[in-house]
Image (cartoon, coloured by chain):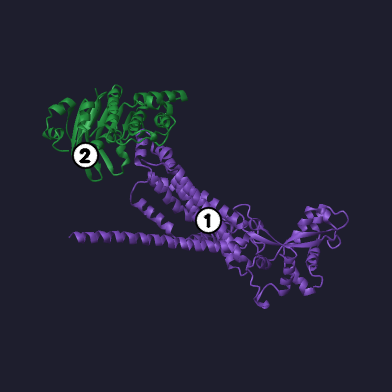
Chain colours: A green, B purple
């Protein structure tokens, strides 16, 4: 089933066009990887999906992005509600400089998802468990989140993102600042999370894309060169550029 | 070739050594000036914290005080103390003629009558008895006792006569002159008499001014900074505002004084010489300082924190209030304190709005006339009397102490609460 449907999306930074006519379908409960060389627009596209580009004054987005058949670029779309449904994990772990508990409970608090302290405790616990962090931190929930290691911080950010039970999770190079062990943990986690969430991950590592994703889109110079199942893209791409990038001839 | 290289290397090392030397000598110079300055202030000012008292036997003669038998408390209040006060001074020299009696009277402050009265009010049983009472010495004798007075000047160039000196020396020899900690310097308001002048009025005036300044400048500046940094679109208009805020920070303080004079006093008819007006004027001056500090510390909050909050579905307002502003508070607060410390030392605008007036009452609210510490320094520095010289330095010491405490506080806030970003 198709969860997100992008139709002819153009993005401009001031006068400079960053994305050209992107049309891409994203399958529900699967992992879609976006790959491509630096500056190709894959992160920009990712940020279109929860309208994080709104923050940048000079950035304008054209085209339709349908999530559950609702165009999020429409004026009637409320960004706060949208971002409740579409969580995001960033490149560098960015926990709030508050306690672990406050980090995870922040989303549910502002969206009024818990009626009592007990409910909140439950949400925090399940979120941390799903993020495979609970066992490591259950005794120090009230210590600052910035005191964790890099990999733990990133899992904390994932726990924070899933605390509001989003339908989609956007991940912008979530492992680029992590060592191989922490990366492996996050990848395992992504595999687990796709049962309940649709995941879109931007990555520089082709090996990672091959390991975690079912679908892959290849971006180059602001254009979506090719997309399809990961198997096909990596084994038998249609486009010469895709082939060159995947085999490491440029990028 | 090789030799050339070695020469070049040597030259580079020498240049570095020279550079270090320049830096060290600059620091040494700065420290030297500071030491001289502080030494001068302390050596002139420390004696102001001591006050000289004459111990004079006073006979509480009921007749001279016009008191009946068994006087009530009110009677004691209303009694006439001037005559016994005069008499006890005149009695210091039984052979004194009328002129000399006058000189004797001037050896103590004009407050002596009150000091004698307080003595009796404290102990009404003294009526008819004689008791040695501590009387504040005149400022000139105070200086004589502290060794600051040029006794060897010809008599007609001195304010203390030979006769007064003779009597004073007798008193010193008999142990009837004492030096005690000068409490009245902290509890009295300003006075034309150096021996009675204190900093209570100007201290309270400064405190009230700073409070008014804080209450106006802080909220306005923080709101302005938050709006400009977090909400305002970046366009020509906001650039224009930013440039003007920076300009405002560079405006000479006396201009703000003129503004206070022309607008607050002339148009709004606010009471002259009050900490209220002073505080408002100072707040105009402090405003740009706090805005700049607050904006800088808002800017220092990493954008990733804002993104994290926004991506969780927080509104812009929630992002700002829950995350950005709390994280920027240490920087904002220490900037505020430094701005206030600047305002505390400001003199020119306060002179223009009339806080230079002679105020001999201690203000109870920002609506009462008051001086402020720096203006008090200015007023005393202008006075001709020798007794005010040490007072100026002492007042500077109090002001400096105040400033050091505030700056220390700013440092502590910054170090203790500022988050370190990895």
Q: Given the image, what chain letter belongs to the residue carrying mark 2?
A: A
Dot 2 surroundings within 10 Å: few (below 14), some, or many (20 or more)?
few
Quadrant into which the N terminus of chain B falls: bottom left
Q: Where residue B376 appears, x then y in whole percent?
A: 58, 61
Q: What residue would you read off at disc 2?
A: A38
Q: Where residue B51 appears, x then y in whole percent?
A: 67, 61
Residue B344's tag is 1
Distance from disc 1 to disc 2, alpha carbons, whole Å, reads 54 Å
Dot 1 surroundings within 10 Å: few (below 14), some, or many (20 or more)?
many
Residue B160's tag is none
Pick whichever, B416 or A162, lies toward us: B416
Q: Is residue B372 left or right of residue B73?
A: left
Q: Secondary structure at mark 1?
A: helix
Residue B354 in view in this figure: no
Pick whichever, B165 or B66, lies toward us: B165
Q: Where residue B82 appears, x then y in whole percent?
A: 79, 64
Residue B368 in view in this figure: yes
């Amino acid at each position: 089933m198709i969860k997100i449907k992008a139709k002819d999306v153009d993005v401009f930074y001031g006068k400079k066009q960053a994305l050209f006519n992107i049309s891409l379908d994203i399958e529900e409960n699967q992992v879609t990887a976006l790959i491509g060389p630096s500056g190709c627009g894959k992160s920009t596209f990712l940020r279109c999906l929860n309208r994080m580009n709104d923050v940048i004054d000079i950035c304008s987005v054209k085209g339709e992005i349908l999530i559950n058949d609702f165009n999020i670029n429409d004026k009637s779309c409320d960004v706060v509600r949208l971002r409740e449904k579409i969580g995001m994990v960033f490149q560098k772990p960015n926990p709030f400089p508050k306690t672990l508990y406050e980090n995870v409970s922040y989303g549910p608090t502002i969206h009024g998802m818990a009626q009592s302290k007990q409910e909140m405790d439950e949400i925090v616990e399940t979120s941390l468990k799903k993020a495979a962090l609970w066992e490591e931190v259950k005794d120090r929930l009230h210590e600052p989140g910035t005191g964790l290691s890099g990999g733990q911080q990133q899992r904390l950010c994932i726990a924070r993102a899933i605390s509001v039970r989003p339908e989609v999770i956007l991940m912008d190079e979530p492992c680029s600042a992590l060592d191989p062990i922490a990366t492996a943990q996050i990848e395992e986690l992504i595999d687990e999370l796709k049962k309940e969430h649709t995941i879109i991950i931007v990555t520089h590592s082709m090996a990672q894309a091959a390991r975690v994703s079912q679908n892959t889109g290849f971006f180059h110079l602001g254009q979506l060169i090719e997309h399809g199942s990961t198997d096909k893209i990596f084994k038998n791409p249609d486009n010469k550029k895709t082939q060159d990038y995947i085999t490491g001839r440029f990028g | 070739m090789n030799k050339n290289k070695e020469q070049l290397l040597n030259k580079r090392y020498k240049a570095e050594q020279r550079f270090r030397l320049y830096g060290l000598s600059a620091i040494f110079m700065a420290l030297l000036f500071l030491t001289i300055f502080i030494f001068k202030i302390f050596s002139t000012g420390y004696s102001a914290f001591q006050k000289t008292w004459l111990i004079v036997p006073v006979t509480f003669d009921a007749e001279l005080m016009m008191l009946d038998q068994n006087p009530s408390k009110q009677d004691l209040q209303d009694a006439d103390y001037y005559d016994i006060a005069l008499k006890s001074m005149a009695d210091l020299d039984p052979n004194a003629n009328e002129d000399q009696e006058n000189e004797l009277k001037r050896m103590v402050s004009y407050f002596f009558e009150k000091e004698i009265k307080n003595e009796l009010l404290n102990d009404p049983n003294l009526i008819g008895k004689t008791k040695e009472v501590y009387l504040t010495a005149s400022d000139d004798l105070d200086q004589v006792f502290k060794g600051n007075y040029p006794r060897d000047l010809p008599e007609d160039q001195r304010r203390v006569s030979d006769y007064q000196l003779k009597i004073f020396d007798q008193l010193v020899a008999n142990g009837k002159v004492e030096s005690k900690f000068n409490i009245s310097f902290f509890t009295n308001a300003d006075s034309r008499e150096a021996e009675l002048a204190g900093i209570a009025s100007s201290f309270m005036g400064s405190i009230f001014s700073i409070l008014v300044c804080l209450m106006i400048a802080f909220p306005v500046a923080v709101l302005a900074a938050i709006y400009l940094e977090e909400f305002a679109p970046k366009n020509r208009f906001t650039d224009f505002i930013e440039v003007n805020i920076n300009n405002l920070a560079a405006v000479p303080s006396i201009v703000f004084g003129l503004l206070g004079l022309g607008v607050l006093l002339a148009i709004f008819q606010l009471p002259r010489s009050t900490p209220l007006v002073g505080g408002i004027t100072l707040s105009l001056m402090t405003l740009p300082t706090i805005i700049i500090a607050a904006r800088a510390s808002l800017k220092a909050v990493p954008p990733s924190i804002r993104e994290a909050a926004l991506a969780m579905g927080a509104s812009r307002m929630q992002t700002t209030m829950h995350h950005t502003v709390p994280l920027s508070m240490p920087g904002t607060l220490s900037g505020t304190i430094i701005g206030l410390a600047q305002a505390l030392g400001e003199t020119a605008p306060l002179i223009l709005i009339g806080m230079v007036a002679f105020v001999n009452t201690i203000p109870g609210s920002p609506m009462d006339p008051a001086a402020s510490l720096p203006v008090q320094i200015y007023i005393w520095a202008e006075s001709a009397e020798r007794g005010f010289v040490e007072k100026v330095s002492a007042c500077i010491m109090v002001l400096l102490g105040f400033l050091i405490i505030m700056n220390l506080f700013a440092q502590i806030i910054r170090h203790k609460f500022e988050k370190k970003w990895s």
